[in-house]
Image (cartoon, grey):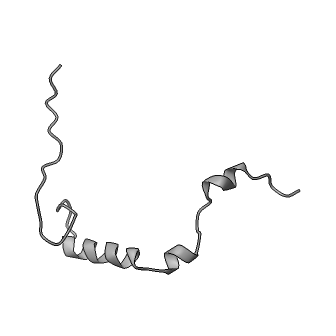
Amino acid sequence: MHSTYTGMPRQARLGGTHTRVGLTDPAVIDAFVERRIQDPSLLSVRSEPSYADFFTVPAA
């Protein structure tokens, strides 16, 4: 069987990892991602349950 799917076109762009899909400038997206990666508060606060939380027995 021969597939005709070619996927998304890959366009190399200097300084970023995102391809231009929407209206947002790729530099804005890259700056947002970098700021989120460097944010230490994301590591200190757990906002969602972990995998192990689903196996704990609630206190009666």
Q: Residue at position x 32%, y 76% from top?
A: 34
Q: Residue at position x 26%, y 73% from top?
A: 30
Left or right placement of residue 52 versus residue 6 in this view = right
Q: Count the marks: how many?
A: 0
Left or right placement of residue 46 versus residue 39 in this view = right
Task: Name the quadrant of the C terminus.
Answer: bottom right
On screen, 38 above or below 50? below
Q: Residue at position x 12%, y 49% from top?
A: 9
Q: Is residue 29 visible?
A: yes
- In this view, the residue farthest toward the top is 1
Task: Name the quadrant of the N terminus.
Answer: top left
| Residue 52 at x, y percent in the picture | 66, 54
Left or right placement of residue 30 versus residue 1 in this view = right
| Residue 57 at x, y percent in the picture | 79, 52
Q: Is residue 25 visible?
A: no
Q: Residue at position x 17%, y 72% from top?
A: 15
| Residue 50 at x, y percent in the picture | 61, 58
On screen, 14 above or below 40? above
